[in-house]
Image (cartoon, grey):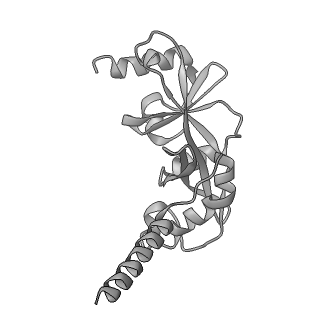
Amino acid sequence: MAKWISLFTAVLLISILTSCMEANPPEAASPKEYAEKYLVEAVLETVRAEDHEDFHFSASENIQIGKLHQKWRYSKAFLENKNDSLEKTDDWYAAVYQEGRPVNVVAISKNESGYYSFMGIGFGKDLAEALDKRTATEGKLIYEFPMDAWFVYDKGHVIAVNDAGQRLLGLEKIRFDEFQKSVYDRYADN
């Protein structure tokens, strides 16, 4: 009997260890390395899911990933209108193309162990189309969380690049100081 319990325990332990190893998502040392090795497969998991249409995908597996764009955020001093500093994040975004058309956006982020891994998909077709029009070196991609608004800051001006951002700023680019004032006014009482 003790022999069977030992055997059962060993099989159970191996099973648990194997499932834990398989549950670890792929990681890479840089965003570029992760994108090149793993990002298409991560997107294909969504394409193959029953709810793929919720993400603007068809069943086609003809998927390409666009250029990576680093996300920037407002610094505390920026929100307090003390200076115009923005902060880099460890989050990177890229348009996802299906059949050659931008349909959604995928994100990767540095995890707690210091490696990059899949963060999410589903940031909207409007952002995918905006990223499709940008090069990786044009300006800073800024995200305003509570409003789900995306902007690009470049050469002293800011322009909204998704529908939520356009509801806040309109379609025209504005000077960075005007943008900062509008952000400050939105959050001054918080």
Residue drawn where x is 36% and y is 35% of the image: 146
Residue drawn where x is 40% and y is 79% of the image: 10
Quarter occupied by residue 148: top left
The image shows residue 93 at horizontal and vertical percentages of 58, 45
Placement of 190 over or under 118, stated as above or below:
above
* The N terminus - image quarter: bottom left
Quarter occupied by residue 135: top right
- Which residue is nearer to you in this view: 174 or 190? 190
* The C terminus - image quarter: top left
Residue drawn where x is 54% and y is 74% of the image: 59
Query: Horizontally, is 120 left or right of 65 in the view?
Result: left
Query: Horizontally, is 31 left or right of 75 in the view?
Result: right
Residue drawn where x is 58% and y is 48% of the image: 116
Query: Horizontally, is 130 left or right of 76 in the view?
Result: right
Placement of 181 over or under 49, stated as above or below:
above
Q: How many marks?
A: 0
Placement of 99 over or under 174, stated as above or below:
below
The image shows residue 157 at horizontal and vertical percentages of 60, 22
Quick one: which residue is furthest to the top in this view?
A: 82
Quick one: which residue is furthest to the front in this view?
A: 2
Query: Horizontally, is 32 left or right of 86 in the view?
Result: right
The image shows residue 147 at horizontal and vertical percentages of 38, 36
- Which residue is nearer to you in this view: 43 or 2? 2
- Which residue is nearer to you in this view: 18 or 151? 18
The image shows residue 189 at horizontal and vertical percentages of 28, 18
